[in-house]
Amino acid sequence: MFHVNPEPGAQIHSTDPFAAPAAQRSPVRRLRGRLAAPVTLWTAPGPAGLTVSSTLVAEGEPDRLLGLVDPESDLWAAVEEAGRFAVAPLGPQHRQLADRFAGLFPSPGGLFALDAWTETPYGPVPADAGGWAGCRLDTAREYGWGLLVEATIESVDLPRDTSPLLHYRGRYHDLPA
């Protein structure tokens, strides 16, 4: 008798069978994996969206937001056209949403078909997000294999304090609020 996954959560392989051998992995990619990063959702009118873990907020006059995005993404095309976008920090309850917008999880009916959304002038944001920022695009330029986006923060809405979702060494991690 053939038996698969005898215990809940059991896996056939304890490691990724498609991963490159350790000696062939990029040391820079390994370094990046060791830097914990916030998981955010960037959205724009259209709507379009993308999970982004390379986001930085810089206080000042004016307040700024920087991030690295895929220049070939639907999000970038929508941001470039609209000149504005929303950024929402995601929480532990958003793991599947983050994977959908990263292209790692199926999205029957489209990326925005599931979940509840709040419409903003900058793009839709998850209704249960702990907050979001509305940003005006200032500049973008090629940076590494991505596009460094620089924006001015025009609006911030922080309705509730929530726990953040972090990305570290290829996996999501929760951090208590």
Image: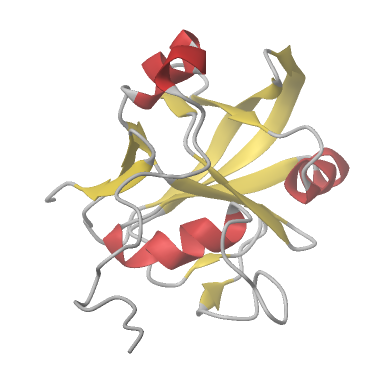
- The residue sitting at 21% across, 54% down in the picture is 163
Residue 121: quadrant of the picture: bottom right
Front in this rendered view, residue 107 or 76:
107
Determine if residue 51 is in view: yes
Vertical placement of residue 104 versus 59, above or below = below
Vertical placement of residue 109 versus 142, above or below = below
Measured as percent of width and height from the top left, residue 161 is found at 21, 56
Measured as percent of width and height from the top left, residue 76 is found at 77, 40
Measured as percent of width and height from the top left, residue 49 is found at 66, 55
Measured as percent of width and height from the top left, residue 60 is found at 43, 16
Front in this rendered view, residue 25 or 45:
25
Determine if residue 58 is in view: no
Most extreme residue toward the right is 81
Most extreme residue toward the left is 176
**Is 165 left, or right, of 100 in this rendering?**
left
Q: Quadrant of the N terminus?
A: bottom left
Front in this rendered view, residue 81 or 49:
49
- The residue sitting at 13% across, 50% down in the picture is 177
- The residue sitting at 25% across, 70% down in the picture is 9
Vertical placement of residue 25 versus 126, above or below = above
**Is 166 left, or right, of 177 in this rendering?**
right
**Is 34 left, or right, of 70 in this rendering?**
left
